[in-house]
Amino acid sequence: MFRYLFLAFIFFPSLVFAADVPVRNVHLAVPFSSQAPEGVWWEPWQNACEETSITMIDAFYAGYELPTAVAKDGILKTIRLKESVYGASLDEPADEIVGLINAFFTWEAKVVSSPTVEDMIAEIDAGRPIILPVNGPDLQNRFFQTSQLDYHVVVLSGYDRDAEVFIAQDPGTQFGKEYRYSFKTVLRAMHDFVPHDTQHGAAVAIFTSPVLVATANTDGDNDGLTKQKEIEYGTVLWLADSDGDGYFDGEEVDKGYLPTLNEQTISNGSVIKEPNDPHVYVLSHGYMKQHVLNAASFLRRGFAWSDIVVVSH
């Protein structure tokens, strides 16, 4: 028996110990955008690294790309959300970034103190990119301008063990796609925001996850629907009244209505019914309802069951 194991080790060592060999490199396909998607580096773009990092990971988890127009809209949306919660600001520490994500995005995040290289590799192995707050000068990125130094935020989306580098999506330069920073550089640069003193900020990273655990039952826009329910109904996490019909999303759901349908916009000729009424009507003149007497009449008019719209009034 031992003779055969010895021969297997000599001739097929990879088969004997394959389970113990760590993965050498991983690269998650996180879409890239610089924080100035149109190449204009004044405000609000000059300090939009946090918002851009959030946008890149949102695109990764939601499965969309970031052409210039989409990236610009996503960054501006995130800036507006940030200002609605924290007011006007240029830089945000890790806990505020996490708060923004957990309130208004379909994934979640948490602050992790002093993560090791192996901790971060494990997250990437699990398919979860990392948001990394850093002291900009410690990155020693040759493309950075002086005005971009001090606090900065990047996304770690991969690694290469053989080269001992992390692969980053760095929004601080147009050349930041799949930018490589050594393990040592990442550990040295990792610092949370401290006004005028980020180099002495705490060593933290923001771990992300597409699976809701800690935030499933939160309600960021106070509309009566939890984050998990908002995702299920397809409502907007930062709008209390997603369809703009004057009713909070939670109120509509409680009464059996669709929180994504503004009944006031239904056109004439539509087939409608109220939630607790079995009768079906054809809408005319914006407010008159003609009762459809039976299924035969319904089908004879050329309607399909999928045409029926449930309305609130």
Image (cartoon, helix red, strand yellow):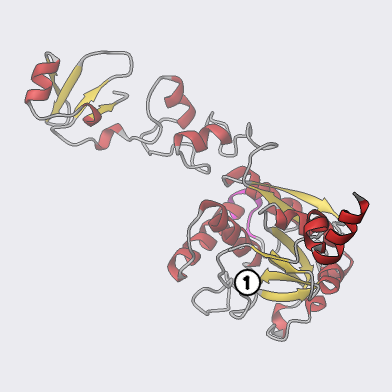
Residue 252 part of the magenta segment: no
Determine whether, in the image, residue 85 is placed left or right of residue 136: left
Name the foreground residue: 195 vs 302.
302
**Quick check: can you spot residue 42?**
yes
Which secondary structure class fits the magenta region best? helix
Residue 87 part of the magenta segment: yes
Q: Secondary structure at mark 1?
A: loop
Question: How many residues crowd mark 1 within 10 Å: few (<14), some (14–19), many (20+)?
Answer: many
Q: Residue at x 64, y 73 (%)?
A: 178
Above or below: residue 215 compared with residue 224: below
- Magenta extent: 83-88
Amino acid at the residue labelled 1: Pro
Q: Which residue is mark 1?
A: 171
Whole-percent x and y of residue 213?
A: 68, 36
Determine whether, in the image, residue 222 is placed left or right of residue 309: right
Above or below: residue 274 compared with residue 195: above
Whole-percent x and y of residue 160?
A: 74, 70
Q: Residue at x 79, y 54 (%)?
A: 19
Q: Residue furthest right?
A: 2
Whole-percent x and y of residue 100?
A: 64, 49
Name the foreground residue: 94 vs 142.
142
Whole-percent x and y of residue 280?
A: 19, 19
Q: Residue at x 28, y 23 (%)?
A: 313
Q: Quadrant of residue 272?
A: top left
Determine whether, in the image, residue 121 is placed left or right of residue 127: right
**Quick check: can you spot residue 222?**
no
Q: Quadrant of residue 129?
A: bottom right
Q: Quadrant of residue 12?
A: bottom right
